[in-house]
Image: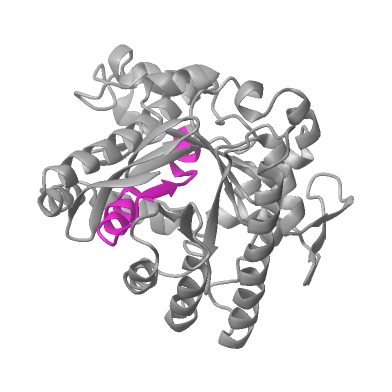
Amino acid sequence: MYKIVNKDGNAKSATFSTVHGEVQTPVFMNVATVAAIKGGVSTRDLEEIDTQVVLSNTYHLHLRPGDDLIYRMGGLHKFMSCNKPILTDSGGFQVFSLAKTRKIKEEGVYFHSHIDGHKLFMGPEESMRIQSHLGSTIAMAFDECPSAKAEHEYVQMSVDRTTRWLERCKKEMDRLNGLHYTVNPHQMLFGINQGAIFNDIRIEHAKRIREMDLDGYAVGGLAVGESHEEMYDVLENVVPFLPEDKPTYLMGVGTPANILEAVDRGVDFFDCVYPSRNGRHGHLYTKRGHINILNARYELDDTPIEEGCNCPACKNYSKAYIRHLLKAGEMLGMRLCVLHNLYFYNNLVKEIREAIRNNNYQAYKKKTLEGMLEFDSVAKSESYNIARNWRKG
């Protein structure tokens, strides 16, 4: 159940009740693609950095270790010892971005594994069955993610097929939830709005899928090549046509600035690999901008990454020590940087929630963006890497 606590303009803060616990929104979902966050971060660590929701990937877990194995182990929550809500991506994005050769047909997609090249097939029913085996809290519908630069005619055809696939996903999910041996009979289903940067297609698609009365709605196919301005324009035009009384999820986004702008347009669920990926390379987020801890200027710096930060790294270690660990190739350095970045994101959305509930969001947004100007330059240099490097995330 989703209940709005307060609205401040278009920004909304809500509570979302699930079988695995209550979520306060806006929320950033920490990405654990293969049931683990890269950088040596455990599910116990997630408690300390105020994680609310974990995101794992259907495609990757289906290939390794296999959803049948996870099912026999009692589902994803037991397998990875996680007591928080877990959202599983449908695998659609990976099918379309990782597969070098693929054939898209009405029944689904024929492609090859990026690991060993063996032939695979995934359609709506297969994606739902895999996610049911995983027993995640929230399952994402199987969809096609067309390129942001695709022609209007192709995007329309793709979105029409995605709508038909969503109908099949819903039917199969209802069936699976009714089986006595299902890991999570309360599994939720989120539909995905597609349409590249064509607002006419996006809006019509939103109107069609909102009639299906799903548990939540995502805006997909963004942050894959379009400009930030184009992304914000899509959100401004499309979000008003999605149900306000259901969660709105912007998939794969993004930078702190992206999150602040998207919240202002009615979005309340986010995920992105930026904090963990950047952390593994010593690129750290702070309220005063982005820092590269490998810089020589931090060699004798005995201060924490950010004064006043309550993450495990900042509470216990100096920049000089963390820099030394990374330079020495010690795993602890990578781990501390990832923990800091994830805490930063989780704390950012916590502050956003508080600002919305205190009717102070615009002032908070303005002040925070002014302190984060450097993030935009980082985002521009990395935005194209999200799709290309997803398999490494």
The total of numbered circles placed on residues is 0
At 37% across and 16% down in the image, what residue appears?
A: 321
Q: Describe residue 259's horizontal placement relative to residue 18 as left or right.
A: left
Question: Is residue 328 in sight in this rendering?
Answer: no
The part of the image, by quadrant, that contains residue 144 is bottom right
Horizontal arrangement in the rendering, residue 235 relative to residue 383 (left or right): left
Task: Work out whether 358 lies above or below 241.
Answer: above
Q: Which residues are magenta?
A: 255-279
Toward the top, the furthest residue is: 316
* Residue occupying the point 80% across, 67% down: 107
Q: Would residue 244 be visible to someone looking at this image?
A: yes
Decide which of 30, 4 is in the foreground and name it: 4
Q: In the picture, residue 357 is in which quadrant?
A: top left
- Tell me residue 102's x, y (percent): 80, 65
Q: Is residue 372 magenta?
A: no
The residue nearer to you, when weighing 297 against 223, is: 223
Image quadrant for the C terminus?
top right
Residue 313 spot, x, y in % from top left = 35, 19
Taking the magenta stretch, the answer to whether it contains residue 268 is: yes
Furthest residue in direction right, as rendered? 118
Which residue is at the front of the view, 308 or 355? 355
Relative depth, front residue between 95 and 73: 73
- Using the image, determine if residue 13 lies above or below residue 191: above
